[in-house]
Image (cartoon, helix red, strand yellow):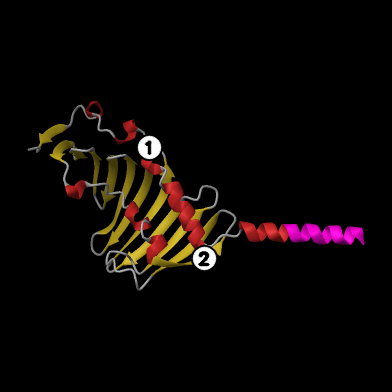
Amino acid sequence: MKFKYFITAVAAMLLSGVALSAQTPEEIVERMNAEMAKGEVEGYSMDFNLKLPIIGTVKSHNLVRGDKFRTEISGKDKSAISWTDATTKWTYENGEITIEDRTSSSSDNSNTEAFNNIADGYRLKLKKETADAWYIVCNKLASNKNKDDAKKMELTVAKATYLPICLRAKSGLFSFSIENYALGATEEDVTFNPAAYPDAKITDKRQ
């Protein structure tokens, strides 16, 4: 009888542990946001893919640290690299470096703002769960009046890190995905180095 009671107690403890470890989609997203906030100090990198009618898919790889960022962008037959700091933007394209004053339109274009309203602006549902990730469907709430927010998004979060693996959405005529988010970007990663382009033509458009 004692052995039977022991097995019952162990089973109860295991079931209790499972219950405690289970997390709601809201709790997962809250933890994800907390992990992503570390990027404000450590910097981060991510890929942003935008699919447009006629134009096709435009891809960018972004590295961000503080108010500096580096973007590699490609689409169809064109590609360019840009670096931006608090006051200046440098763009390398077709063998030419163009230097311009930083404007409001050249703010951090890594598009992580897509994550900002998930917690408050969407109803979250756990679609499925694997050993490595959670798959969450995000449906826009009627109370969310932000016209730029997509009606529906699909979010995949890594269990090991709580960082987003992928965020996909379609809004109007275009669709986008944010992928390969990772913490860590150095000053060297995001700072323009003219020595790396010794043969480039320089065009300075600063005022």
Which quadrant is home to the N terminus?
bottom right
Magenta-drawn segment: 1-13
Task: Kindly tell me whether residue 141 is visible in this rendering.
Answer: yes
Q: Quadrant of residue 198?
A: top left
Residue at the bottom extreme, as displayed: 142
Tag 1 secondary structure: loop
The secondary structure that most of the magenta stretch takes on is: helix
- Is residue 111 or residue 55 the one in the foreground? 111
Badge 2: residue crowd in 10 Å (few <14, some 14–19, many ≥20)? some
Residue sitting at 30 percent across and 36 percent down? 190
Residue sitting at 41 percent across and 38 percent down? 184
Residue 80: image location, x then y, percent: 23, 43
In the rendered view, does 23 fall on the left or right side of 37?
Answer: right
| Residue 144 to residue 110: above or below | below
**Residue 2 lies in the magenta-colored region:** yes
Residue 68: image location, x then y, percent: 28, 39
| Residue 9 to residue 184: above or below | below
Badge 1: residue crowd in 10 Å (few <14, some 14–19, many ≥20)? many
Judging by the rendered image, the residue that carries numbered circle 1 is: 185
Residue 173: image location, x then y, percent: 27, 68
Marks 2 and 1 sit apart, C-alpha to C-alpha, by 31 Å
- Is residue 103 or residue 135 the one in the foreground? 103
Residue 133: image location, x then y, percent: 53, 56
Amino acid type of the residue that numbered disc 2 sits on in the rendered structure: Leu
Tag 2 secondary structure: strand
Residue sitting at 48 percent across and 61 percent down? 26
Amino acid type of the residue that numbered disc 1 sits on in the rendered structure: Ala
**Residue 89 lies in the magenta-colored region:** no
Judging by the rendered image, the residue that carries numbered circle 2 is: 126
In the rendered view, does 49 fall on the left or right side of 2?
Answer: left
